[in-house]
Image: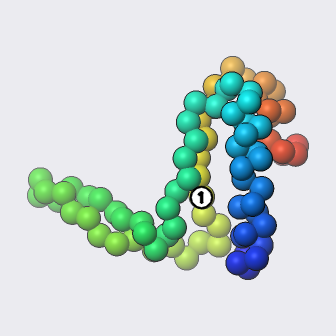
Amino acid sequence: MTPEAVARLVSQCPALDEKMQATGKMRVSASLAEPKDWKTLRTRAGRMQASDGPYTEAKEMVGGLFIIEAIHKPGFVPCFVPRAL
C-alpha cells in the first residue's frame, strides 16, 4: 500500500473503534507498534535474549487486535464487520 492509502485506512479506525466500543462486547483493543520498533524475545540457556525484528517481507501484516465477547458468529458479524465477509 502507498503511504496515502495507509493514511486513508488508518483515518477510518477511530470511528470503527467507537462503534465497536458502543456494542459493549469489546473486551480488549490494542494497536501494534511499527515494524521498525519490533523486538523478538527468546529464552536460550535459561537467559532471556532480545533482538531486533522479526523482519517481515509479507505484503500484509497485523496492525492491531480486538478481543470481543460473542456466543456465535452471527451475533458478532453485524456489530464488528463493516461489510459482509
Looking at the picture, does residue 4 appear above or below residue 23?
Answer: below
The answer to which image quadrant residue 52 occupies is bottom left
The answer to which image quadrant residue 84 occupies is top right
- Where disc 1 sits, the SS reads loop
Comparing 65 with 20, the one in front is: 20
Measuring 87% from the left and 45% from the top, which residue is drawn there? 83
Q: Is residue 73 visible?
A: no
Residue holding disc 1: 62
Q: Position of residue 54 (x, y in %)?
A: 42, 69
Measuring 43% from the left and 69% from the top, which residue is drawn there? 37
55 on left or right of 68: left
Q: Is residue 39 visible?
A: yes
On-image quarter of the C terminus: top right
Looking at the picture, does residue 76 appear above or below residue 52?
Answer: above
Looking at the picture, does residue 35 appear above or below residue 31?
Answer: below
Q: Position of residue 60 (x, y in %)?
A: 65, 67
Measuring 29% from the left and 59% from the top, which residue is drawn there? 41
65 on left or right of 23: left
Furthest-bottom residue in view?
Answer: 2
- The crowding category of the residue bearing disc 1, from other C-alpha atoms within 10 Å (few below 14, some 14 to 19, many at least 20), is few
Q: Amino acid at mark 1?
A: Val
Looking at the picture, does residue 30 appear above or below residue 12?
Answer: above
Q: Position of residue 36 (x, y in %)?
A: 46, 74
On-image quarter of the N terminus: bottom right
The answer to which image quadrant residue 82 occupies is top right
Measuring 72% from the left and 36% from the top, which residue is drawn there? 20
Furthest-top residue in view?
Answer: 71
Q: Position of residue 26 (x, y in %)?
A: 64, 31
